[in-house]
Structure formats: structure tokens, C-alpha cells
Amino acid sequence: MYSMRSLYQSAAGSRGPDIMMADLLSRQETLISNIEHQILRVDKILTETEVSVRTSAKCGSAEPSNAVTCTSSTPSAAKLNLNWPDIKYPLDIVVHADPTRLPVTPWALRKLLSGSVMIRTHVHSSYKGELCAVEDDYANMDRTNGKIKIIFTLIFRNIKEMEFMVDPVNQMAVSGEANLFRYICRTFPIFPALGVFEETLSDHYIDVICSNLIGAKVKDQQTTLNYLVDQIAQKDGMLVCNKLTPADFCLHAALQKSPFLSLPSSAQKWRRSVAAAF
């Protein structure tokens, strides 16, 4: 019989295959060790994440009084969502007003929303009275600036109640600052969603503020303010509910126009919360 010598037989005295095998085993052991280390790290991360999720769940399922403590001492002070809706900008709103009874909404929005709101003023040829000093952006306004979202054009004239228009061709003029304020809030829904009753109550307070606080006699203003402060004290530190509403912003705007009104220290926290939301 014939036999053939193995082509893979190592040379005499050579330990090549043994050395290669040992090196391979060493590398496998190192790889396994690294994998075990990574598994331990993943287990640790998962454990920490689970604890965090459980803590958040406890915070969310706690009683209302405890929930406020878990989330924040002033939950309503969170920044509002200022994502502007997809409409043509800038939005032009023309307001006719008597300089002796100026609306507060344009300047309040200008202050809280910074460069997103600008104001320009004109005097109607029929108006012969005195003009008060107001902030006007007419000289430095650039309509091509993408940051400008709202432009208020105020025309001073002799008029009993302010009125505004957005589309003079297709819309009639609407009277009353309460309606101007509601239009702004509905065009730019930046406030948290409200229930039907809460939204109705917010509208009620807006009417109270615009009729009995803005432009009223000082005595009547203080009486109205005291009533509204009592409502804030009864509703978790905000005017309507435990969330910031258009009524809170409307009251904040009215107080900017009447800084001489006495706001109790108990309501100062509310004022800071509204300002911090913008």
C-alpha cells in the first residue's frame, strides 16, 4: 500500500500550532472579559434608569398637593410654548384708539415677547388733542426681519372705544380691548389647553379686567384688583386654575399700565410667575 505524508505536519521540534492556539485563547479570554465588563455597565445604567422612572411615576401619581412639590414649587412658571403658527408674517393689526385711553395689549406683548412684537404710531388728521409719550418702533422697523411676528399700527384719533382690524377688505372693525386680547390669544395659542369651563371663566375675568381695571377710576380699580387677588389666593396661586391662562396675562398687562395700584405681597409670587413664563 502507498501512504502520503501529511502536508500539514509541522516540522520536527516546531511548536508553532501550540503558540498560535495559546495566543488565540488569550485573545478570546480578553474579549470575554470585555464583554462581561460591558454587561455590568449596561445593567448599572438600566438599574439607574428604572429608579428614575419609578421616581417620576411616584411624582406623577401623588396627591395634587404633593405633585406640586415633586414637579416644581411654582408649576405655572414654566416657560410657555412660543412656537408660532404657520401663517404669513408679520401679522399687521391696525388699532384705532384715543390717546387718553390707550390699550395695554400692544405694549404688554411688546415687553413680554421682546423683538417679536413691534409698534408704530400715527396721528389722524382730525385729532387735535395732546399726545402722551409712548414707545414707538417706527424709525427702526424692518419688515423683512424674520423675527418680527406682529406689527401693531396704532392710529390716534377721537374715538370713544378702541377698535381694531386685521383684514380691512374682508373684515369689519371689532371694538373693545377684551376682543383684541382674545383675538391675539386665539391666533397664537401659546397658553396651555383649558377645559370649557376654565376657558369661559378666563373670558369672564378678561371682561372684568378690561372694563373695571383698565381706564377706570382709581377707587374702582383698587376694588376690582382686590377681588381678583382674592381669586388668585383661592385657586392655587393663579387666577383661573393651576395653569397660566389668558386672564392671568391680561391682568399682568393691566398692572403694567397702573403701577400705582397696591398689589399685596401675597400676589407678588403670581406676578413673578407670569413674567417668568415669557
Image (tube, rainbow, N blue to C red):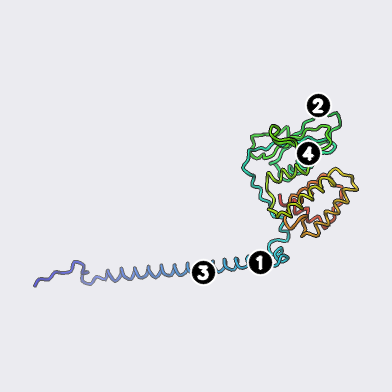
Residue 26, percent from left and from top: 37, 70
The answer to which quarter of the image holds residue 167 is top right
Looking at this rendering, what residue extends furthest in the top direction? 125
Q: Using a 10 Å C-alpha cutoff, classify the residue at mark 2 as few (fewer than 14 neighbours), some (14 to 19) or many (20 or more).
A: few
The CA span between labels 2 and 1 is 63 Å
Residue with the mark numbered 2 = 125
- Check disc 4 and report its element: helix, strand or loop: strand
The CA span between labels 2 and 3 is 77 Å
Q: Residue at x 63, y 40 (%)?
A: 87
Q: For this view, does 158 lie left or right of residue 170? A: right
Residue 272, percent from left and from top: 77, 53
Residue 152, percent from left and from top: 73, 37
Q: Are marks 2 and 3 in contact (CB under 8 Å)?
A: no
Looking at this rendering, what residue extends furthest in the right direction? 219
The answer to which quarter of the image holds residue 85 is top right
Amino acid found under the numbered disc labelled 4: Ser
Residue with the mark numbered 1 = 61
Q: For this view, does 97 lie left or right of residue 278? A: right
Amino acid found under the numbered disc labelled 1: Ser
Q: Residue at x 72, y 38 (%)?
A: 118
First in sequence, mark 4 or 1: give its number.
1
Which one is in front in this view, the residue at disc 4 or the one at disc 2? 4
Which one is in front in this view, the residue at disc 1 or the one at disc 3? 1
Which one is in front in this view, the residue at disc 3 or the one at disc 4? 4
Residue with the mark numbered 3 = 43
Q: For this view, does 211 lie left or right of residue 83? A: right
Location of the N terminus (image quadrant) = bottom left
Q: Residue at x 75, y 54 (%)?
A: 273
Amino acid found under the numbered disc labelled 3: Asp
The CA span between labels 1 and 3 is 27 Å
On screen, residue 135 above or below 31 = above
First in sequence, mark 2 or 3: give its number.
3
